[in-house]
Image: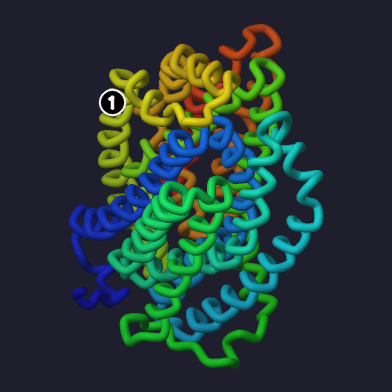
Amino acid sequence: MARFSSEQLGTEPIGKLLIKQAVPASIGILVMSLNILVDSIFVGNWIGSVAIAAINVVLPVSFFIGALGMAIGIGGASVLSRALGAGRKEKALKTFGNQIALTILVTVSMVLLGLFFADSLIPAFGGKGAIFDYAKIYYVIVLYGVPFLALSMMGNAVIRAEGKPKFAMVAMIIPSVANLTMDYVFIYMFDWGMHGAAWATTLAYVFSFSYILYFFLSKNSELKISFSHFGLDKVILKEISALGFVTLSRQAVVSIIYLLLNNILFNLGGEASVTVYAIIGRMLMFALFPVFGITQGFLPIAGYNYGAKQYDRVRKSISIAIKYASLLASMVFIGLFVFPTEIASLFLGTPENATVQELAINAYVLENMPNAMRWVFAATPIIALQLIGAAYFQAIGKVVPALLLALSRQGFFLIPLVLVLPRFMGELGVWVSFPISDVLATLVTAYFLRKEMKTRLR
């Protein structure tokens, strides 16, 4: 791979730089999302539709613990990018060392707690009825690998902060390919069922961590730390925690939404409704990969140039990122509106030992998911502004607006809506809540971003 110095974040043309940063991020997110998507298709076809719902129950717990690493990674990456932009190399090294130590300490503690309270957490997140047994198997095995997931997420954010997006892309591709390969071997060839799906996921996390460890130990990384950098520094920890809290809060809200919707939908339509949401949840992760890629590519550019006080480049990066992301989001919107039935059918097979219940769930999903998906993605064309706007404040270290905007879409708007609308509209009320929250959050973000560009970045 061509060598790339972090200084280029402050010199190359913004359009070219954003493409250079965003394309590898988008490819990495695409492969990771495809992994989640195809993994669900394999599980649905080879184990059964209830197994998809079971994974959906486990995801918020495992992803929340993994997101601790992401939060520490993104929070520290903001500090690190600005330190590199300001020429403060020693602070960047100390920040990275503190990120590693904090990730290990926090995630291992959370995994131990998660295993201890497994039987209480699984039903709380909707793992009831026929879903529980599948979810318990998957939950316990996957939690063993979550610390590796957290370290991988943390390391990936730091790699991007260094301006090395291609390495970050490879770090996301490796576990995805490994997971799908092991899915085929463990589930299809060895017939391990849910155990196979869980071990494939866990081992994929280990592969990802192994590659990221290689990157930082090789000469590709500028961050060569020593044992002294692992000593926890209160000032740096405060910065990492404040900015990481934005990411963690957002993921916490996502986990709360899974908890609420799995339970609300189970009460409205049982396992079938939870399965509809599980598939839509996979599409939410997959379909918006180009928008998330632009957002990830934008973060180090904005952070570095803000640290270097090149505010004209920051303004330009915001404008170009929103344009690119909006165009891609609109293309996603069209595809999902045209082919929702075809998408639903991909997830639904008929295993040889399929029960009457599973066959009934399949029929329900095929009938109800297309309309639900159209509602959930109805406001997709405008979502880019909200994501880029929230990312900007996080990139420059403004904790309060970053936190408020990150939580606005799913926390301040979606949660109240899904608690109220289903009481009057039934299951439709759940799906309608998504576009309403998207529109409201985008309006709020547009206000704050416009104000920032007229004052701080003028």
- Residue 183's spot in the image, x, y percent? 43, 51
Q: Please tell me whether residue 332 is drawn above or below residue 317 in the rendered image.
A: above
Q: Please tell me whether residue 379 is drawn above or below residue 291 in the rendered image.
A: above
Q: Amino acid at mark 1?
A: Gly
Q: Residue at x 35, y 28 (%)?
A: 381
Count of number-bearing discs: 1
Foreground residue, 349 or 144?
Answer: 349
Image quarter of the N terminus: bottom left
Residue beneath label 1, please? 335
Residue located farthest toward the top when viewing the structure as drawn = 424
- Residue 56's spot in the image, x, y percent? 58, 38
Foreground residue, 278 or 184?
Answer: 184
- Decide: few, some or many residues near mark 1? Use Cα within 10 Å; few <14, some 14-19, many ≥20: few
Foreground residue, 424 or 123?
Answer: 123
- 129 vs 414, left or right, is right
- 372 vs 29, left or right, is right
Q: Residue at x 65, y 86 (%)?
A: 231
- 257 vs 392, left or right, is right
Observer able to see residue 376:
yes
Q: Say what secondary structure mark 1 lies in.
A: helix
Q: Residue at x 47, y 31 (%)?
A: 352
User: Residue 24 occupies which quadrant of the picture?
Assistant: bottom left
Q: Residue at x 60, y 56 (%)?
A: 142
User: Residue 347 occupies which quadrant of the picture?
Assistant: top left
Q: Please tell me whether residue 67 is drawn above or below residue 57 in the rendered image.
A: below
Observer able to see residue 243:
no
> What colour scheme governs how the chains and residues are painted in the rendered image of this protein?
rainbow
- Residue 77's spot in the image, x, y percent? 48, 67
- Residue 168's spot in the image, x, y percent? 36, 65
- 396 vs 218, left or right, is right
Foreground residue, 253 or 12?
Answer: 253
